[in-house]
Image: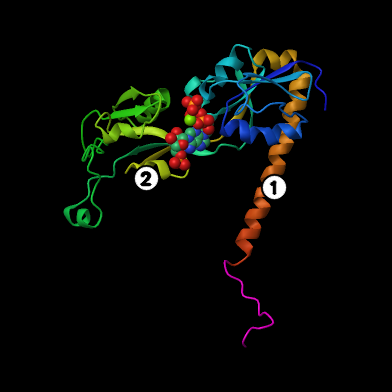
Amino acid sequence: MAFADPLTIALSKGRIFKETLPLLAHAGIAALEDPETSRKLILATNQANVKLIIVRASDVPTYVQYGAADLGVAGKDVLLEHGGEGLYEPLDLGIARCRLMVAGLPPRVTADAAVAAPSPRAGEGRGEWDQSRGSARPRIATKYVKCAERHFAAKGQQVEVIKLYGSMELAPLVGLADGIVDLVESGNTLKANGLVPLEHIADISSRLVVNKAAWKMKHASVMALLTALRAAVRERQAAQDQSQAIREESPPFRTFPGPFSIQ
Ligand code: PRT
Ligand code: MG
């Protein structure tokens, strides 16, 4: 596949880059360098007209909105927070999946239960951000300020949202906040810090975003890339469904009578 128009694609290092590469390969695009080892922020590809730029995950929508990149891949969390102005979001790539959640210390345990499962010592009792359980205006620490405000406003709950840039899980432990809004994938980070998921806000995956002007001006090239990515996503989904079906069909233990089996 050759692209008639020059295309710049904004990606972030880490999980998004790694999971987007196999999808780009379906469109015949391969990076010539690895951003984990190269310090370059503009990466050439095997396609003369296509380059990748490496930006912070939360900056991807901004680069695409202002046309510094024609396309990009951004988490739905980032898009919800950004607002999506100036962008089209034509494809769910189904990668970097996780959930945006409210989390906090476990609800206060009863005296009996406390013997079996003592509540975390640090910041004990501060997990009661829920109005029915504690302070009138609980504090919620997050880097997703707008998402958190929208979530609690929709529930008619008054909270004070505190903006943090990372390590949100620490906030309830040291008394900075009563709860957090953050991404949860396996739940291991919450668990390791004695926190529990409390409320689901949104299912998150990464989306292809396209600059609105590029969508018009570079239509043929954008559509060629979009079509190839859509096929790649469909193919990967079919392969995942198939392996899931095989897992569900086969019993966990299968015993075959071998040549030495005792009947
Ligand atoms: O690191 P930087 O500040 O530059 O940006 P970033 O942290 O947003 O980038 P990156 O690469 O970490 O994440 C990019 C995108 O991946 C996010 O915007 C999400 O859409 C998606 N994604 C998917 C995740 C996770 N899963 C995830 N588990 N992003 C972050 N996490 C973190 C989460 O914040 C928490 O600290 O992993 C921890 C929880 O993981 P578990 O498995 O312990 O539950
Ligand atoms: Mg990160």
What residue is pinned by disc 1?
238
Q: Position of residue 161 (x, y in %)?
A: 32, 24
Q: Position of residue 81 (x, y in %)?
A: 47, 23
Label disc, if present, on residue 203 of the rendered structure? none
Report the amino acid beneath label 1.
Answer: Ala
The quadrant where residue 139 appears: top left
Q: Secondary structure at mark 2?
A: helix
The quadrant where residue 254 appears: bottom right
For this view, does 155 lie left or right of residue 108?
right
Up-down: is 27 above or below 191? above
Residue at screen point 72% across, 18% down: 7
Up-down: is 117 above or below 59? below
For this view, does 181 lie left or right of residue 243?
left
**Do the CB atoms of the residues marked 1 and 2 lie less than 8 Å apart?**
no
Up-down: is 233 above or below 160? below
Q: Secondary structure at mark 1?
A: helix
What residue is pinned by disc 2?
191
Which callout, 1 or 2, points at the residue further toward the start of the chain? 2
Write the start and end of the magenta stretch as one range: 252-263
The quadrant where residue 24 appears: top right
- Disc 2 CB within 8 Å of nearest ligand 1 atom: yes
Report the amino acid beneath label 2.
Answer: Lys
Is 250 within the magenta? Answer: no
For this view, does 90 lie left or right of residue 140?
right
Nearer mark to the viewer, of 1 and 2: 2
Other-residue count near label 1 (Cα within 10 Å), few / some / many at <14 / 14–19 / ≥20: few
Q: Residue 234 or 187: which is nearer the viewer?
A: 187
Residue at screen point 38% across, 31% down: 167
